């Protein structure tokens, strides 16, 4: 599988708008009949195009946000599409501490009748510690067995290093930013499919 992702944020005075594109697609796979005779190839692809909005709420260190995504899934010549919605909040009680939570898939509106699948809501909470270019974060999902631990260190104004562990893999990456444009690279040893 190959993962492709692009995103951007437009910061405003009191709020932020975002746009995202994510695609997970397989390489061509063999399609065979019941007698194991090759019938050609097929691919498996999932694509999401999203719009996001966030703004401060009541307290100066409390923000809320929402995302709406158009999602398509294609397997061989079967395709379905839907609109998915997420809701999140972030609170910074101190300059070095951030607490956050999301409800993903709070809205799941199917645009066609090609699939009986439902996207179940996912609850996720997290905490992050920040100090002098170093960040340490921990996230946990609603089943309590799905967890993520990550660290980030800004080695140079142009280079940030990242590493992480989760319930099934280890990951590392880096980013470089110049004139407000950031390039990120990440590697994970987990199976994307």
Image (cartoon, rainbow, N blue to C red):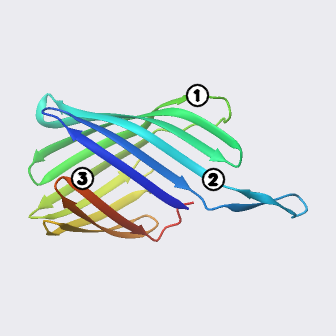
Q: Residue at x 14, y 32 (%)?
A: 14
Mark 2: give few (<14), some (14-19) or many (20+) Cα within 10 Å: some
The circle drawn on residue 44 is 2
Most foreground residue, 64 or 126? 64
Most foreground residue, 86 or 124? 86
Question: Does residue 163 appear to the left or right of 31 in the view shown?
Answer: left
Please report whichever mark, 2 or 1, sits nearer to the chain's N-terminal start. 2
For the residue labelled by badge 1, is the local secondary structure a helix, a strand or a loop?
A: loop
Q: Residue at x 57, y 60 (%)?
A: 193
Most foreground residue, 114 or 181? 181
The circle drawn on residue 127 is 3
User: Which of the 4 image quadrants contains residue 176?
Assistant: bottom left
Q: Residue at x 73, y 58 (%)?
A: 41
Mark 1: give few (<14), some (14-19) or many (20+) Cα within 10 Å: few
Question: Does residue 90 appear to the left or right of 61 in the view shown?
Answer: right
x then y, percent, for residue 99: 22, 47
Which residue is tagged 1? 111
Please report whichever mark, 3 or 1, sits nearer to the chain's N-terminal start. 1
Most foreground residue, 52 or 169? 52
User: Which of the 4 image quadrants contains residue 11?
Assistant: top left
Mark 3 to mark 1: distance in Å?
35 Å
Question: Does residue 163 appear to the left or right of 131 in the view shown?
Answer: right
């Amino acid at each position: 599988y190959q993962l492709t992702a692009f995103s951007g944020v437009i910061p405003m005075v009191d709020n932020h708008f975002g746009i995202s594109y994510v695609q997970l697609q397989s390489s061509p796979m063999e399609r065979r009949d019941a007698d194991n005779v090759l019938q050609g190839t097929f691919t498996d692809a999932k694509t999401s195009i999203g719009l996001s909005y966030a703004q401060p709420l009541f307290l100066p260190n409390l923000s809320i946000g929402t995302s709406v995504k158009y999602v398509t899934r294609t397997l061989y010549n079967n395709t379905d599409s839907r609109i998915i919605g997420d809701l999140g909040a972030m609170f910074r009680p101190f300059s070095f501490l951030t607490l956050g939570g999301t409800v993903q898939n709070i809205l799941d509106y199917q645009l066609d009748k090609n699939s009986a699948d439902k996207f179940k809501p996912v609850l996720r909470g997290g905490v992050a510690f920040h100090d002098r270019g170093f960040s340490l974060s921990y996230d946990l999902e609603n089943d309590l067995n799905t967890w993520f631990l990550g660290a980030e260190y800004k080695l140079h104004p142009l280079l940030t290093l990242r590493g992480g562990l989760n319930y099934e893999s280890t990951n590392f990456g880096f980013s470089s930013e110049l004139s407000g444009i950031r390039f990120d690279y990440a590697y994970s040893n987990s199976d994307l499919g």
